[in-house]
Amino acid sequence: MQKNRAYYIIDFDSTFTQVEALDELARISLKDHPDRALIYQKIEDYTNLAMEGKMSFSESLAGRIKLLEASDQHLKKLIKHLRKKISKSFSRNEAFFKKHADDVLIVSGGFKEFIIPVVSPFHIKKKNIYANTFVTNADGDIIDYDHENPLSQEGGKVKLLQQLKLKGDLVGIGDGYSDFQLRESGLVDKFYAFTENISRQTIVERADHITPSFDEFLYVNDLPQSISYPKNRILCLVIGNVDEASIKLLKDDGLSIRHKTTFEDKYVKDVGMMLLADGEEISNEQLKNASKLKAVGYLGNSKGKVDADLATEMGIVVFDDAKHNPRNIDFIPKRMVNFMNSGATYLSSNFPNLQLPKIEKSHRLIHIHHNVPGIMAQINTAFAKHDVNIVGQFLMTNSKIGYAITDINAEYDKAIFKSLKKIEHTIKFRVLY
């Protein structure tokens, strides 16, 4: 049975980008205005009231435009700024947009003048970008907007999709009430509340699915993605008195954080990473039960607090700071993030030290094994049997384990995973990205 064509209806502000563009435009156009702080707040209030469904969109838009005092020159600065504020999970999945260029629609209450130049590098077609347009005077000052455009009106996204009459499976991705209205009206089959940048409770509780990143959306819909597993599904347990700056580094990388004063056994089977304050410890029993644990960061000397030998046997990388470096607030979390993103074990206290670049358009496989002769021959035999093309390969060993990273072409038979896991003396195997 042939599947229906899928269309992806994606919002722009606080979804494709991390920010609300009109709010940012106000900060640019009003930066020298004596009452700028008060006006900024009014504009943000208009934005939030509309996004939460507490004010009509048309009323909110008209109120914001009147306060902007913006021009073409301000728009140029805004575009430059927005290009640096694309949501991280969208940025790393450009390949998806290229492959689905005909299926992605940007539908926004924002304005084409800044949306088109920001999303066009992602292969999104101009004809698939639906947004408002400004009205300017001869001097290039923004004085109004096109009131006939359905997207400037209350329920504008609903009106637009009714006009488009798209046939197929439609899904909506956004953060605000106007995005949810598409689901409420029955015009999209599923609505995904996008919470990477902002989570609005009134929207989240009505969504079909909460997607903390675009990676999560691609994952649940079995679509090609740049990483093998969404980071928001990796639980990072933070134990003890840990500086908020350390936690922020992990949170900003998209990990799911639980900060507890002491270790709670209920998390042991699901935890993927741990960051421990100096003085905290994890027992051998807890470590043995943490089957998904990949990395431990310790903000001090972990000797006597984390059994490094057991961690090594289990394929768990430990990063600690035996010398109590003042920089360990960010130094240790950065090492953990780097390991999760590239497989680098540089400055680990128990693993062979390996530092390597990310290779584009490839998938990276990590194989941790006991250091016995012949393992690499078996790994490469498995690749050969599955006709997998190796782009790059790295191996480091110590007296106990071997740490092999293999970069392969993006197209491959996934049966290779089972073959690699079955190799004798394998400790852990995972697809990094």
Image (spheres, helix red, strand yellow):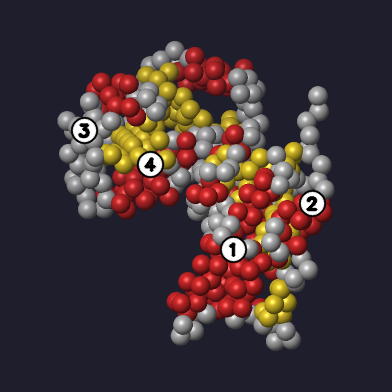
Amino acid type, callout 4 = Ile
As helix, strand or loop, the secondary structure at mark 3 comes to: loop
Amino acid type, callout 1 = Met
Residue annotated with mark 1: 55
For image coordinates 40% across by 43% down, the residue present is: 337
Amino acid type, callout 3 = Glu
x then y, percent, for residue 220: 59, 34
Residue annotated with mark 3: 281
Residue annotated with mark 2: 162
Left or right relative to 236: residue 98: right
Q: Is residue 227 visible?
A: yes
Depth check, front residue: 67 or 398: 67
Q: What is the spatial separation of the Cα atoms under label 1 and label 3, in whole angstroms?
A: 51 Å
As helix, strand or loop, the secondary structure at mark 4 comes to: strand
Which comes before the other along the chain, label 2 or label 1? 1
Which comes before the other along the chain, label 2 or label 3? 2
Depth check, front residue: 48 or 10: 48
As helix, strand or loop, the secondary structure at mark 1 comes to: loop
- The image quadrant of residue 235 is top left
Which comes before the other along the chain, label 4 or label 3? 4
Against 273, is 19 above or below? below
